[in-house]
Amino acid sequence: MKFSLSPWRSLMEAIEHVVWNATILTMDDEDTVAEAMAIGGGRIVAVGSNEEILQLAGEGNARRDLRGLTVMPGLIDTHNHHNLAGEADLYRLNFPPTASIEEIVQSTSEWAKQLGPGEWVLGETWGSGRYGELSTSEALQKLDAATGNIPVLLTDDSHHNKWANSEAMRRGGIFALESDPPGGHVVRDIEGRPTGLLIETAGALVEQARLKETGVPKVDHVSASSERAIQMLHEFGVTAFQDAATTREIMAGLKTLDSQGRLKAWVVSSMLVNDFIFGTEFLGEPLLSSGEQHRTVHHRPDFAKIFLDGVPPSRTGAFLEPYIPDDVHGHNHCGGTTMPIEELETWLRRCAELGIGAKIHCTGDASVRAVLDVVEKLRRDDITDMKVHIAHGSYTHPNDVARYGQLDVVAEISPALWYPGVIVEALRSVLPEPRASRIHPNRDLLDTGATLAGGSDWPVSEDPNPWPAIYGLVTRRNPTGEFQGTLWPEQAITLNEALRVYTTGPAEAMGLDDTIGRLAPGYSADFLVLEKNPFTTDLEEIKDFTALETWFSGDQVYAKK
């Protein structure tokens, strides 16, 4: 068995405990499987056989006999909105995207009854497949009747669009609009009255009005939301993540947590350049320039976030070919980008000047191509070290697939978009086949040299559990069985490749590949304990895997009860 030892003598001398008698999937370049590892100072000191590690550790250290259980590196989520998810769990109404209008209205009514004066009903998530049902005055009347003068703002499963009652629209100035705001759309009935369905920036207007009334959340509220989200991530074995739309308040909350020893994850922030959905006002250059003051040991403000298009179900994703025709958009609607390509290039060059990367939201193949075209110019200008993520990249034209690897652009991919499900059904309602189902060409991306990094997009996804996503990557089947069939099965990848999409791939994408993503000497002692080895288990069982324990920086942060 290969025996590897940290060159840090100080760590060798500070071994605190040993994990042994385990199946340790190191996820190193050789796919080494070890039996034991020594930990000290929050780092891995040595990895090897039981005999080697126990002899190295001596008699004065704690020893943990795992009795054959499997250990692997802590999982990494390259794209989530952790603070939103934590806040939703602590402070907001929640219902599943499969909820009917009647169920949504009933839940909203009950939630409203327990609110104090001046509070809003904030809730999530309604299914994007319900656009048609919510686009009626009858649906709005039901919501108004259940809530009266209490403002209500409910988010869809993409978190790009809102459903508001009349009181919330009044406060957000929606009734006073004579035309749609730039980058958004107010859905109206046949008489021209708003129905409450607010697309992109139209919903952001109401969010801004709410924030002016209630104020920006205080740091204790924000830090509590982050801490709760991280606790939830630990339940799934996730020990590092990249927040995909970070505000000044979120960064301040993370800095507070780390200063108090409460930040139990590696966090990379993506600072907002533009915003069409959250109502954020402090963004762009002022936010990017302030990132460094929030840097801590475990928090890295190392990326900017750019929304380059919207989402296909609301026909705001930017495509090379038209959507299915409808009465509102006609026969030649392809969506569009949120900014001219020249402006995108300016922002990416600014990121290079600041020494940070860029995570760029793209759902249509036109926006993907625009990013690749700009990055190609940057690489020609010798800007070669800057990390660029195409986030989601749901649709990529076949001619552009190989460019990811050629240009060293990360394909940051999201579950529920590589197997049949609610979101895929919504996509098929607006895009023609076979184009609608040609989503996430993961096999082709890997074969042409791209780095794949998995991101949950939680709370757009119901939870951040990587295991159903890993199952879906390998099978292209829905892990719940609720939706039958496969989605473009030719793009399935192997189990080893899928595990790397949540370990070594994200670590490289986030610039932390010298610290996390594998179990090797000198790396952070972040790992999870599993009952079974995924490589020797029936594939159908993997979707139901769960962490028995999660460890971060040498400390146990979760144990299954």
Image (cartoon, rainbow, N blue to C red):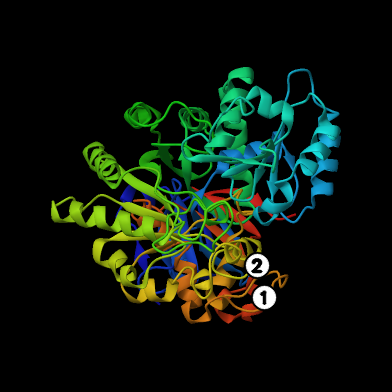
As drawn, 531 above or below 392: below
Residue 75 image position (x, y, % from top left): 51, 58
Residue 284 seen in this snapshot: yes
> How many discs mark residues in the rendered view?
2
Q: Amino acid at mark 2?
A: Phe
- Given residues 303 and 236, the one toward you in this image is 303
- Quadrant where the image shows the C terminus: bottom right
Mark 2 vs mark 1, CA separation in Å: 7 Å
Task: Residue 341 in the image: state x and y as whole percent.
Answer: 29, 47
The answer to whether mark 2 and mark 1 are in CB contact below 8 A is yes
In the picture, measured across the screen, residue 199 lies left or right of residue 152, that is left
Identify the amino acid type marked 1: Glu
Label disc, if present, on residue 64 of the rendered structure: none
| Mark 2 Cα shell of 10 Å, populated few (<14), some (14-19), many (≥20) | some
Q: Is residue 451 above or below residue 152?
A: below
Quarter of the figure with residue 150: top right
Query: In this orientation, which residue lies closer to the viewer: 320 or 115?
Result: 320
Determine which quarter of the picture holds residue 124: top right
Q: Is there any visible trace of residue 521 in the rendered image?
A: no
Q: Residue at x 78, y 17 (%)?
A: 117
| Residue wearing tag 1 | 541
Please give the residue where the numbered disc 2 appears in the rendered image: 545
